[in-house]
Amino acid sequence: MKRIYIFLMGCLPVFVQAQVTTQRTYCNPMDINYRYNYEQLNDSISYRSGADPVIVNHKGEYYLFVTISGGYWHSKDLVHWNYIVPDKWPMEDMCAPAAISVRDTLYLFQSTFEQRPILFTTTPENGKLYFYNRWLPRLPKDVGPWDPALFYDEELNKWYMYWGSSNVYPIYGSELDKHLHLKYKGDYKEMLYLHPDEHGWERFGRDHRSNITPFMEGAWMTKHNGKYYLQYGAPGTEYNVYANGTYVGDHPLGPFTYAPYNPVSYKPGGFVTGAGHGNTFQDNYGNYWNTGTPWVAVNWNFERRIAMFPTGFDKDGQMYANTRFGDLPHNLPTKKWQSKDELFTGWMLLSYKKATTASSVKDTFAVANIVDENPRTFWVAQQNKPGEWVMVDLQRDQEVRAVQVNYTDYKSNIYDGFDPKIYTQFRLFASRDGKRWEKIADLTNEKRDRPNAYIELEKPVQARYIRYEHIYVASPNLAISDIRVFGNGGGKAPRTPAKFTAVRDTDERNAFIKWQKVPGAVGYNILWGIAKDKLYQTYQVFTDQPESLEIRALSKGVSYYFAIEAFNESGVSVASEALFVK
């Protein structure tokens, strides 16, 4: 989709150093200083956003590129990210950038319908960028290359580019000529189109319930065991079902075959919803990751954040991203993982729909909103001043391991994303009786903007009450969507749900799921896939929702297996027996 740009001429290198801790876990959405986005500057809409992420492993370190961010991020461990404004940037800020690391060089290109250069650097950590070519030739009107992806096939010693962002045009691909500084080599080719009449997950709207023609964008190529996985995002970023799918081929330019197990990365339920339009990369241990851009949509419909999910290829070459508990804390890998759930810490959500109190409440923005696991509802304090507070009553002593504070840009008036006054400061306290308080986190001296601050405690604490004490945010309002508390309830995991059924609709793209409510459960994960040992898809629902769900993400002509598991504050049940649904 087309966007409005802001010009960034003559920027000097800027480095924002993240606080270094002994943090061993991460939690989606990613805890970075999301930049204030200028797409709607002329409409006076101010919001932070992180869209269309690309993470590149360059010489053992990681670089994150995001739409209209005025720069990029650098990390050595996938959790502490330093923001860098380079000394050379395109005429306008980059939208849906393409990045690739080949040997000692990182290449960077932007979405465009005009002539634009490819940039390169061997030292991205210091912000030094150079022109690799001055202009990539113009393509016919509306063809692009928008949402480009660069790919180098080491075995063939050839370069390629894929692109497309439209509900009319397909994903395109072209070989690039290395001897002509990566200009197009020959004609570009049509790679693939959407087929929502066959693939339920490609339908637009919340839970795929809209008849609007869906969008396809965010091309990415991964080569694994001699196969080429051409990935794409669909059906649109504005809803909970934004996902990544793949076609598979034996050559970089196809022909490609639709993967029957699609979508590859899909997260329609929970706090973080939407997993589409990202990329796939490998960490230093050889583990694969898939990135995506979850939906927030408070101030602007395209307001988003960034998530990354452990990803793999099974013994049959099936590609999958593990989004099960994908917005709960996960361990950072220290080796190559063997099981898809190995990185999950087992720290459960302790705060869902718990009792809350606050120092003040503005208008109808109730304090209960901070524990509803919905980023589109939020609490607003009467004033944005030090000392405002909000408290979560966990109802009994529980072991607390981490807390995530998610801010909202309610009526924000910030348009200068480089203002040094943009940072986040707060303190967290814990108590067993509501009278004696222990300080468990102190960001008093932070000079970093952390709209999705994830705090892993140095050691677990036993607590019934968690209190947020405000110090500073740059926005005119103190607004928090969710304070999420993680740990262990110290009890027993729930039992497996009984009376589980799965029935295919006459429209094969849909299936109807039912189960019996489990006492004490916080929620349920509906699991499905194309084999009993391939239940890679997850739809999370909470226990205060109906004990039924319509899955509308299936493909015609593909048989599935369905199962269910329950979870509470102490753990996860054994999954039910997988039911075959033809």
Image: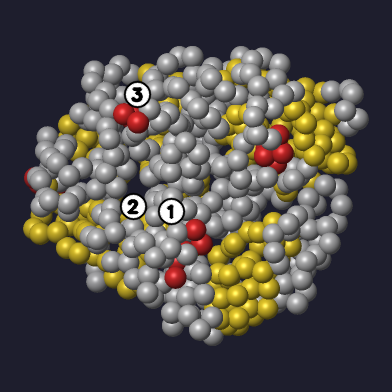
Res 395 seen here: yes
Give the Cα separation between the discs numbered 2 and 1. Answer: 8 Å
Which one is in front, 414 or 444?
414
The residue that disc 3 covers is: 85
Which residue lies at the image location 32% right of the left edge and 73% below the top edge?
257
- Amino acid carrying label 3: it is Val
Location of residue 70 in the rendering, given as x and y in whole percent from the top left corner: 34, 28
Q: Earlier in the sequence, mark 2 or mark 1?
A: 2
Give the Cα separation between the discs numbered 3 and 2. Answer: 24 Å
Q: Is residue 347 left or right of residue 252?
A: right
Say which mark, if any, is on residue 218.
2
Q: Nearer the viewer, mark 1 or mark 3?
A: 1
Q: Is residue 431 left or right of residue 477?
A: right
The residue that disc 1 covers is: 276
In the structure shown, which secondary structural element does the residue marked by tag 1 occupy? loop
In the structure shown, which secondary structural element does the residue marked by tag 3 occupy? strand
